[in-house]
């Protein structure tokens, strides 16, 4: 099973940018659909973005479309989430998730079976 470790979170002002990384070990991300979810305090975990096994299909939540970009670097065994024009409502713990050999990435937590520990993103107004 793949192990996932997120990094890159932090405190940023509204309008700023951050790049989150999700480093995988134990298996290659080439064999996995990968996703980012987030969970704000007191709220349920919600879908942010996902990328298919072959990296061709990328999907985004409406709330981040046009601002966030997901990518997968097979050589570095890492998935990234580039976040631009950040808003205070983007504040949350961001989690990386994976699903083995999923050709079509899902939008719910049930679609994924491995998770990282999360990284905090705080956007100040």
Image (tube, rainbow, N blue to C red):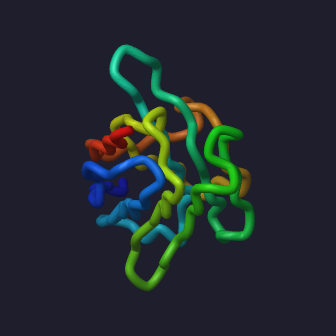
Q: Is residue 86 left or right of residue 70?
A: left
The structure residue drawn at horizontal position 31% and vertical position 41%, both measured from the top left corner, is: 122
**Which one is in front, 117 or 7?**
7
Give percent across and percent down for residue 68: 58, 56
Compared to residue 26, the image places residue 117 above or below, namely: above
Residue 31 is situated, as x and y percent measured from the top left of the image, at 54, 66
As drawn, 120 above or below 1: above
**Depth check, front residue: 102 or 124:** 124
Position of 121 with respect to 15 (left or right) is left
Q: Position of residue 16 (x, y in %)?
A: 42, 58
Residue drawn where x is 52% and y is 40% of the image: 112
- The furthest residue to the bottom: 75
Query: Split into 4 quadrants, where in the image is the C terminus?
Result: top left
Which quarter of the figure is the N terminus placed in?
Answer: bottom left
* As drawn, 112 above or below 104: above
**Residue sticking out furthest to the top:** 42
Q: Nearer the viewer, residue 22 or 48?
A: 48
- Give the residue drawn at x 57%, y 36%: 47
Q: In front here: 110 or 45? A: 45
Residue 21, position as x, y percentages in the image: 36, 63
Q: How many marks?
A: 0
Going 56% across and 43% down the picture, which residue do you hit? 48
Horizontally, residue 63 falls left or right of residue 98, namely right
Q: For this view, does 13 lie left or right of residue 82?
A: left
């Amino acid at each position: 099973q793949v192990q996932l470790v997120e990094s890159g979170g932090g405190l940023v002002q509204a309008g700023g940018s951050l790049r989150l990384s999700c480093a995988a070990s134990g298996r290659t991300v080439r064999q996995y659909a990968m996703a980012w979810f987030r969970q704000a305090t007191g709220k349920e975990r919600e879908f942010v973005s996902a990328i298919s096994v072959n990296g061709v299909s990328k999907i985004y939540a409406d709330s981040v479309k046009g601002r966030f970009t997901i990518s997968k670097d097979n050589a570095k065994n890492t998935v990234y989430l580039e976040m631009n024009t950040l808003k205070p409502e983007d504040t949350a713990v961001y989690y990386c998730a994976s699903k083995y050999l999923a050709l079509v990435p899902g939008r719910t937590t049930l679609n994924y079976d491995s998770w990282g520990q999360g990284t905090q993103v705080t956007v100040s107004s």
